[in-house]
């Protein structure tokens, strides 16, 4: 097994400094850093294969081959039955909008789509947009502890439901949703199941056959790749969706939802990102290497996330949100607030110390509205990924402690903190 300790030297960007301090990237949920193997693959594409597709010359044929090879690698990454199930797009949001537009031509007024209050807006907005066609949306509720209210799922999924859209993992609280429970209900009423796996993809192996979903979306820039969106459709399904398509574009899956010229170099990078993850695990084939590697990555990440949670939890004035880090299934993503400070002030302070964290709602805006925390500016979010270390976690806890104590003292004096 390749050790995760040596992995840091693969990431050029994480060697940088801010104000003399090594940078700590805890912004992974907004996009991970890119290893040199991925950068080299994109560079190699431009220096050796750069061309458009379907030509009668070598570079074009190589481009065709790269696209098909990467399609197959993504299929393996998601355990899809074949590369014909994988479509490429600009990002997850754009693919989901294209899909919603196509499905909106099949669904009829009075049909219903179920979304959740926890999901990223990219898995809500495209479906809410169909309301103008008379296709209603119903919401699975969010509980105060950052988990879905499955009783409300039982109520909103009914005979009118044509599609249930749910995230695999929450990009704000790290909650892993009970997809099996939702799938069972969707199946009872004959509804399609669509899964947003964008946040889950860097943290666990995804198996579309085990999830038994009809559609699944993810985004390579969250798992060490470049900005490319990925869509899985159950075999045969996309062929019957009337997508927006030029008449020159092939009318079958996986191509019929792909528009214009794709980002070939970035797609080459997606293949390298999958290979990069797989290289961390042992196995007889790409799939078993990926499963082993993602298990090892999960163990590493969750150990750090537990240390971060416990460290933050021990600081007076810090409040952690979402399911406890010891929950059986949990993504290594933490959300917290500090009394007397806005999340933006916290992130400004940390940013000056070279610690990259995000503030706000991260497009999980409905969750923040429902929990009524937008009035305090949302939350501070930190996400652990493969290149983070225990030293980084310790330094982060120290900085947050200093800030929280400084804030407490200033509040005692009736003043406010300056970052
Ligand atoms: C859970 C989740 N879903 C969807 C998206 C949107 O992905 P993209 O930026 O590829 O459109 C994000 C991006 O942050 C996300 O975290």
Image: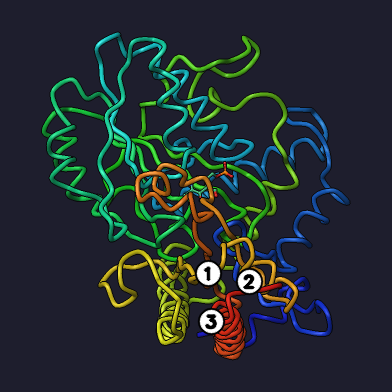
Q: Alpha carbon of mark 2 to alpha carbon of mark 1: how far? A: 8 Å
Mark identifier at residue 340: 1
Which mark's residue is nearer the viewer, 3 or 1?
3
Q: Is residue 312 above or below residue 136?
A: below
Q: Is residue 244 above or below residue 307?
A: above
Location of residue 299 (image quadrant): bottom left
Q: Is residue 399 left or right of residue 108?
A: right
Location of residue 50 (image quadrant): top right
- x and y, in percent, of residue 310 in the image: 40, 85
**Residue at screen point 48% across, 41% down:** 83
Q: Is residue 224 above or below residue 158?
A: below
- x and y, in percent, of residue 385 in the image: 54, 71
Q: What is the secondary structure assignment of the residue under circle 1?
A: loop
Return the disc, 3 or 1, that comes first in the chain's sequence: 1
The answer to whether residue 52 of the structure is visible from this angle is: yes
Task: Determine contact: label 2, label 1, CB under 8 Å.
Answer: yes
**Tag 3 residue:** 412
**Residue at screen point 48% across, 27% down:** 253
**Residue at screen point 54% across, 51% down:** 362
Mark identifier at residue 416: 2
């Amino acid at each position: 097994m390749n050790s995760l300790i040596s992995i840091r030297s693969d990431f050029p960007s994480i060697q940088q400094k801010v104000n003399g301090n090594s940078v700590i990237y805890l912004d992974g949920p907004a996009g991970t850093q890119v290893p040199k193997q991925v950068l080299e693959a994109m560079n190699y594409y431009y220096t050796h294969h750069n061309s458009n597709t379907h030509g009668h010359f070598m570079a074009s044929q190589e481009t065709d081959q790269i696209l098909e090879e990467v399609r197959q690698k993504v299929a393996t990454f998601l355990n899809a039955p074949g590369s014909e199930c994988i479509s490429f797009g600009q990002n997850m949001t754009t693919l989901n909008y294209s899909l919603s537009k196509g499905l909106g031509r099949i669904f009829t007024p009075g049909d219903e789509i179920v979304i959740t209050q926890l999901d990223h807006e990219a898995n809500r907005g495209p479906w809410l947009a169909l309301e103008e066609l008379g296709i209603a949306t119903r919401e699975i509720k969010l509980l105060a502890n950052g988990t879905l209210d499955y009783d409300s799922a039982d109520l909103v999924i009914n005979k009118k439901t044509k599609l249930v859209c749910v995230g695999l993992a929450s990009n704000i609280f790290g909650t892993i949703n009970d997809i099996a429970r939702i799938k069972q209900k969707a199946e009872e009423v004959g509804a399609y199941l669509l899964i947003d796996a964008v946040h889950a993809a860097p943290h666990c192996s995804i198996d579309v056959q085990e999830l038994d979903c009809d559609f699944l979306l993810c985004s390579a820039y969250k798992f060490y790749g470049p900005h490319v969106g990925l869509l899985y459709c159950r075999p045969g399904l996309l062929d019957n969706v009337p997508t927006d398509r030029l008449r020159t574009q092939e009318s079958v899956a996986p191509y019929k939802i792909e528009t214009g010229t794709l980002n070939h170099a970035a797609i080459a990078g997606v293949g390298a990102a999958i290979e990069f993850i797989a290289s961390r695990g042992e196995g007889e084939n790409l799939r078993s290497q990926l499963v082993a590697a993602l298990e090892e990555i999960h163990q590493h990440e969750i150990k750090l996330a537990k240390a971060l949670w416990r460290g933050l939890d021990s600081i007076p004035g810090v409040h952690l949100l979402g399911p406890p880090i010891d929950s059986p299934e949990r993504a290594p993503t933490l959300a917290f607030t500090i009394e007397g400070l806005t999340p933006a002030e916290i992130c400004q302070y940390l940013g000056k110390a070279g610690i990259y964290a995000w503030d706000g709602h991260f497009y999980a805006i409905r969750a923040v509205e429902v929990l009524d925390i937008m009035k305090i500016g949302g939350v501070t979010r930190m996400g652990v990924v493969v290149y983070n270390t225990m030293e980084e976690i310790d330094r982060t806890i120290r900085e947050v402690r200093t800030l929280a104590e400084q804030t407490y003292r200033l509040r005692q004096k009736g003043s406010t903190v300056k970052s």
